[in-house]
Image: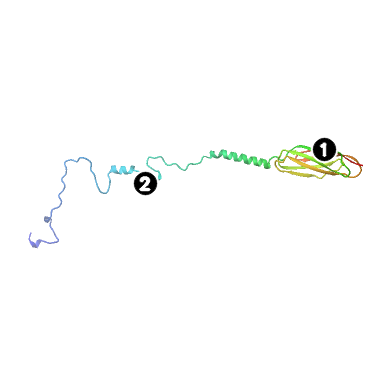
Amino acid sequence: MNDDDYSATELGSHWFEGPRPDPTPDRVEGEVLRFGPGVTAAAARRAENTPTAAQIWHGTLPGAPPPRGPRTRRPLRYVPAAAILLAVLAFLAWREYGPRVAVRSVTVTAPGGPLGCDGTANVLGVVRTDGRPGTLTYHWERSDGTHSAPLRETLPRDRKEARLHLLWTFQGQGTHHAVARLVITSPSTHTAETTFTYHCG
């Protein structure tokens, strides 16, 4: 080659030697390890079986049973409490709106001894009940043929006795054998009476 054929920008292949190819080994022993991007199939399988942080956090590990949903409360655990509440409400409703007052007995008493001139007799009627609330309707009848207008006595709960008074005034001379009668008309009919004597002169 002469200088006229030489160029600084063109180098012939005869100026340098390329890399020599690696000799092919006769045999390969052991495992082939590769470095760089990509993994072997065995490493990929191991990566698939390794739980991720997200799986551990959410409890979705492979092979683990699915997470339980929120525990539903058993409705039967409230049945006894509901039954007790209903029983209490039924009892209160029965006390308030159930059967009304019932009369057990009626007695009438007059002052002892004869009544003097122009005296007033205080006749007492006692009505015993069962203690339930309600209203008694009654009137008084007198032996002179007169009677009172219908009267009412309201009883609160747990009051088991009603005391009803009749004031009967007498005037004039003479002797009178008086009879006072108490008539209960509601809630049931009951009658009781007493006698006393008026004497003047």
Q: What is the distance, in whole Å, between disc 2 and disc 1 at their CAs?
A: 98 Å
Judge by depth and name the residue closer to the eye, 7 or 144.
Answer: 144
Apparent side of residue 110 relative to residue 101 in the rendered image (left or right): right
Judge by depth and name the residue closer to the eye, 151 or 114.
Answer: 114
Question: Where in the figure is residue 8, as x and y percent of width and height?
Answer: 13, 61
Question: Where in the figure is residue 170, as x and y percent of width and height?
Answer: 87, 44
Judge by depth and name the residue closer to the eye, 64 or 182.
Answer: 182
At x 83% / y 41%, what residue is drawn?
Answer: 141
Q: Secondary structure at mark 1?
A: strand
Q: From the image, which quarter does the C terminus lie in?
A: top right
Q: Secondary structure at mark 2?
A: helix
10 Å neighbourhood of mark 1: few (<14), some, or many (≥20)?
Answer: many
Q: From the image, which quarter does the N terminus lie in?
A: bottom left
Question: Where in the figure is residue 51, as x and y percent of width and height?
Answer: 35, 43
At x 82% / y 38%, what residue is drawn?
Answer: 193
Residue to which mark 2 is pinned: 53
Residue lying farthest to the bottom in this orientation: 4
Apparent side of residue 164 relative to residue 6 in the rendered image (left or right): right
Apparent side of residue 20 relative to residue 35 in the rendered image (left or right): left
Residue lying farthest to the top in this orientation: 105
Indicate the quadrant where residue 66 lies: top left
Q: Which mark is residue 88?
A: none
At x 61% / y 40%, what residue is drawn?
Answer: 86
Question: Where in the figure is residue 110, as x and y percent of width and height?
Answer: 82, 39
The amino acid pointed to by label 1 is Glu
Apparent side of residue 39 relative to residue 4 in the rendered image (left or right): right
10 Å neighbourhood of mark 2: few (<14), some, or many (≥20)?
Answer: few
Q: Which mark is residue 193?
A: 1
The amino acid pointed to by label 2 is Ala
At x 55% / y 40%, what residue is drawn?
Answer: 78
Closer to the N terminus: mark 2 or mark 1? Answer: 2
